Image: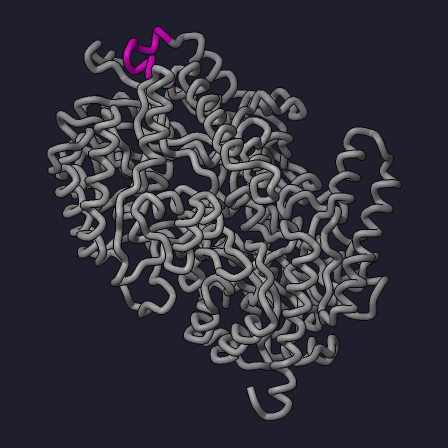
Amino acid sequence: MTEQSAAAAARATVYGYPRQGRNRELKKAVEGYWKGRVDTAALRETAAGLRRTNWRQLADAGIHEVPSGDFSYYDHVLDTSVMVGAVPERHRAAVDADETQGYFAMARGTQDVAPLEMTKWFDTNYHYLVPELGPDTVFAADSTKQVGELTEALALGLTARPVLLGPVTYLLLAKPAPGVAADFEPLTLLDRLLPVYAEILADLRAAGADWVQLDEPALVQDHIPAELTAVARAYRELGGAADRPKLLVASYFGRLGDALPVLAKAPVDGLALDFTESGAANLESLAAVGGLPGKRLVAGVVDGRNIWINDFEKSLTTLGTLLGLAGQVDVSASCSLLHVPLDATAEGDIDPEIVRWLAFARQKSAEIATLARALTEGTAAITAELAANRAALASRAGSALTRDPAVRARAAAVTDADGRRSQPYAVRTAAQRAHLRLPLLPTTTIGSFPQTTELRTARADLRKGRIDTAGYEERIREEIREVVTFQEKTGIDVLVHGEPERNDMVQYFAEQLTGYVATRHGWVQSYGTRYVRPPVLVGDISRPEPMTVRWTSYAQSLTDRPVKGMLTGPVTMLAWSFVRDDQPLGDTARQVALALRDEVGDLEAAGTSVIQVDEPALRETLPLRAADHAGYLAWATESFRLTTAGVRPETQIHTHMCYAEFGDIVQAIDDLDADVISLEAARSHMQVAGELAAHGYPREAGPGVYDIHSPRVPSAEEATTLLRKGLEAIPAERLWVNPDCGLKTRGWPETRASLENLVTAARAIRTGLADGGS
């Protein structure tokens, strides 16, 4: 490889880093603040300590330019709303009274005030708080957080680059505020927002910022000409400001397409682009526009979203090509490292052969630094690293852990008939109604109930040997009895066992399937203080024995009402895992579907009449470009049907989805051929009910009336209002009543009150319908 000149030495950098700390210190501090055990000063000191630790880890790994401003107590999009003064009017008094309490009120709500809507960050499992804007929105700059964190980094003697969410992406992520016309386009506020961004950039320049990064991931989606014109206008104005730092516009999660020539022509100083498999077309597009002569290019050649080691030789080939396309080429990950765990070396329980194949945030930082050194000094400078990298890649490619001939033979033998129910929906629904004998507007929950202190203690005691398996299982039985008794007393119609034995809706199954590896410390932020440990999909998937039948059957033995069997669907099992990158996702989905099909069959054989297969990630995993949708949806819907199609007509198949823009995939939801779907709808004010009706969705649906991601208890009147709105779109004979999502993260007092109000609302509507009203 040709070395860069000393003047153009490649720098190593990252766009962002995991926030939580090695032992999830941020989660503990924030939740302690919510409970009144941690004051504001202590919360801020914990956060500052985590930032210092992160920056020092990055610097020690060889990262030349660290990010600042990427840290967040809850969500960086919410932070942006605060930065530009876009605080909803209903939260204004709380923010003015106490900025920290007001911040969390926007995120979580209070008993009296609803929170901001929450949905998925592009095609990831990270949730962001949706900005609420309208024609009367007045923006005002508040750079306190951004300037403060930059100052902290500079005080450590580091080169720091503030990271801001770009103005175009911010507006494209926003929605009309409550009471604003649904057809209002937040992007029309761009000219009002740009001076605020210019003021914040000037503040950062005055505070010592040489470069500022503006993230525009929305630009990897399809855009109409007016949106591309807005991009050109935004960066013409920001780039033309006299008092500004150098601007690095970053885009990730895929190819830029038509937005690349717009940005290449803009008066900005550099671009940061994705050059992994998802953004491979960016290299060709960059060459087509003549590159970035005289400008900086930050090349995202290390995958920031998956956990496999980088192929150094492949990355160096890409970087070598890029050297001729920009004035300066630096090295980074494809996106923020927020989406991967912190440190693979902490995983002492994983087979050392597999650990060799893994790179979490700390390992990826080292990979980036190694590639930057090779780009500057030549490959001879990293001879030992290249040899180790080749050996680890060869180890994975040749390992027997990744292949199971029996699994592959079974998947190859699947036919179209295996993915079709034996009877059409019209026949099935009649059989199910006769068999289940449910009332109008049947009530149910999504699956999980609160994980109590007693249960968590028992799980920890089992892990540490303080109790044996028999003692732990007696705790599980007690939890199930309590959940079933409560549901019967409350009047819920279709019960669940509460899932006390499950640590996570994906990890629980992954630990019982071959081909998966579970981590102990691989935490990744999903939203706020909710962290998950995505398992690692290493090899071919099969189910050695039943996974859920025992506890579902036990719950059913306690009641005459139907108890749902609860499974996580194949797409979600992939989306919320770190998937293998050595075969097509559709092939892996088929393997998972066949393993789950066996479980569905065993549940039905054990007498379970209602089986829910959750697919909350179906919309989340939808490719960001429309041209890629059909191929994805074909294997995604096929894998669901393959999981569920083997049951008898009278067995009712449910599915569940939450916190996504469902209107984009209503046809795919229809194609699943589930009998009942439950969907998040409370925060989005029943939007999805109208989307189902507009499509002509013919099956039963339960748009949620209880927002479980907020501690507030919705009143019976509030639930009734939402149900009436749902009835405007969905006929009563096809409408179910349920929360938005599982109740695992809630406490028992709020759960009891909320579900009692939910049942009260359903009964009130039933009475009104029986009396001829609504």
Quadrant of the drawing holding the C terminus: bottom right
Residue 447 at x, y percent in the picture: 67, 57
Residue positioned 24% across, 45% down in the render: 257
| Residue 27, above or below 709 | above
Residue positioned 61% across, 21% down in the render: 353
Report the span colored magenta: 369-381
Residue 461 at x, y percent in the picture: 80, 34
Which is the main secondary structure of the residues drawn in magenta? helix
Q: Is residue 98 left or right of residue 592?
A: left
Q: Is residue 227 left or right of residue 730?
A: left
Q: Is residue 376 magenta?
A: yes
Residue 80: quadrant of the picture: top left
Quadrant of the drawing holding the N terminus: top left
Does residue 38 show up? yes
Query: So how many labels did they put on this image?
Result: 0
Residue 719: quadrant of the picture: bottom right
* Pick the front one: 517 or 502: 502
Residue 60: quadrant of the picture: top left
Does residue 531 show up? no
| Residue 5, above or below 202 | above
* Pick the front one: 131 or 49: 49
Q: Is residue 699 magenta?
A: no
**Residue sitting farthest toward the front:** 97
- Colour convention of the picture: one colour
Residue 199 at x, y percent in the picture: 21, 39
| Residue 619, above or below 764 | above
* Pick the front one: 607 or 252: 252
Residue positioned 55% across, 54% down in the render: 709
**Residue sitting farthest toward the bottom:** 772
| Residue 197, above or below 291 | below
Residue 15 at x, y percent in the picture: 36, 31
* Pick the front one: 693 or 24: 24
